[in-house]
Image (cartoon, helix red, strand yellow):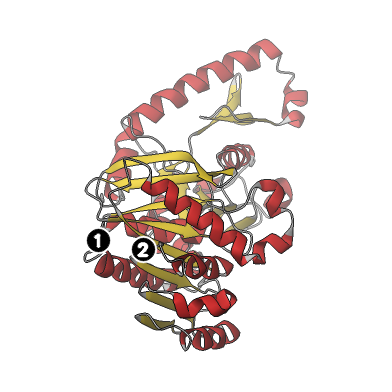
Amino acid sequence: MLFSDRHEAGRRLGARLAGLAGQDVVVLGLPRGGVPVAAGVAAALNAPLDLCLVRKLGVPGQPELAMGAVAEDGARVLDERVLREVRVSPEELARVEERERRELARRAERYRGGRPPVPVAGRTAVVVDDGVATGSTARAACHAVRARGAARMVLAVPVAPRDWTARLAGAADELIALATPGHFFAVGQFYDDFGQLRDEDVVALLRQHRPAAGPAAEVDEEVRVTAGAVRLGGRLTVPAGARGIVVFAHGSGSSRHSPRNRFVARGLHRAGLGTLLFDLLTEEEADDRANVFDTPLLAARLTGAITWLRGDPRTGHLAVGAFGASTGAAAALWAAAEPDAALAAVVSRGGRPDLAGERLADVRAPTLLIVGGADRTVLDLNRQAQARLTCENRLEIVPGATHLFEEPGALEQVTGLARDWFTDHMAAAPV
């Protein structure tokens, strides 16, 4: 046997996926058997655990033979080869699908207890099962998660047939299996203990891996930010009792769905800080690469967003800080140099503060520059920019980190540094 049980398989699969640690990941288990495996992966990655609710469409009279699968959001995948071979009528297919969709609704309520699914938009979604047989359920799961806006899809299983990548080509961005043995008849043949799980087991696993709650969100909604003559999509999140709010300036053509900035934002929420993640460019503007490096344009959009926040009764009383990444860091510092900016603090992550040019000398907001130790060129540019700053400032180097802070633990260090800088300076900032 390859695995003693699903829990051991989850620990081993989590170790295989260790490179994803520190990224903006959500782990989704396929009930019931995939959930204990997914729990092990979520623990290894320190990532949230949720479900991907999918039901196999079994052939009438041969329920173990899958003719397709359906997911809770309405996605459906059919195996046309099986349908042709067993000659299932449209009426029979409809009856099976209706029954399985009722079961999906029951399980969603039973497992989550009315809680909404964990958001996956803009994040890396890791879909986990205890193994792949035909692949129809896994394909439906990936299709459903992709439709929810996942930025990257990883399908990970302990065991699969040798031809599984051909069967599931295009279903996910990455397919990972610990083992692909020959003579594959059923997933259970590779486990010593492959006992059936109960609904109660799934609920208990979700409860064990539920993240500690941060401050309750007073506001958490999609917004349209008015910045000059344009309106830009954004996400406004304000915990109850927030001490301040941080506006994110994305860089290099990224958007409000940036998984790294969303990761940092969640860390700020836990510290009682609000965030506004918004698109600095319209879709048409983003198509012109020159706009990504137009620091005055990006800074004007950021200034417009700050003005919008101060005019909103929900956020107008809060101290405002700015977090900039890559070219967005230059925009944040350019905006901070405006005479009436009154920013409480600025943080740059892997930024290009040098692009703010002569404006650097006019920045008054306390500024933290965070750079990866292995990002040599950007580190040199940050040192040169720091020498031109006259405000309170500090340069923090994350050892071994590259430009995107993809190394295990690197983004957590960025989040901790940003959190402490903002909370320290917003506590004393006038509102």
Residue 132 against residue 399 in the figure, above or below: above
Q: Earlier in the sequence, mark 1 or mark 2?
A: 2
Q: Could you tell me if residue 65 is visible in this image?
A: yes
- Residue beneath label 1, please? 430
Residue type, label 2: Ala
What amino acid is found at the position of numbered circle 1 in the picture? Pro
**Residue nearest the viewer, comparing 327 with 72:** 327
Label 2: state its secondary structure. loop
Disc ID at residue 342: 2
Query: How far is disc 1 from disc 2 in space, using C-alphas?
Result: 9 Å
Q: Is residue 86 left or right of residue 349?
A: right
Q: Dot 2 surroundings within 10 Å: few (below 14), some, or many (20 or more)?
A: some
Are the residues tagged 1 and 2 within 8 Å (C-beta)? yes
Q: Report the side of 178 relative to 366 (left or right).
A: right
Mark 1 packing: few (<14 Cα in 10 Å), some, or many (20+)? few
Secondary structure beneath label 1: loop
**How many discs mark residues in the rendered view?**
2
Residue 61 vs 111, above or below: the answer is above
Q: Nearer the viewer, residue 422 or 46?
A: 422
In the rendering, at what x and y percent does residue 68 appear? 64, 30
Q: Nearer the viewer, residue 159 or 346?
A: 346
Image coords of residue 205 (percent x, y): 31, 46
Task: Tell me: residue 56, above or below residue 404.
Answer: above
What residue is rendered at 50% in x and 57% in y? 302
Q: Residue 279 placed where, x, y %?
A: 56, 51
What mark, if any, has residue 116 been given in the picture? none
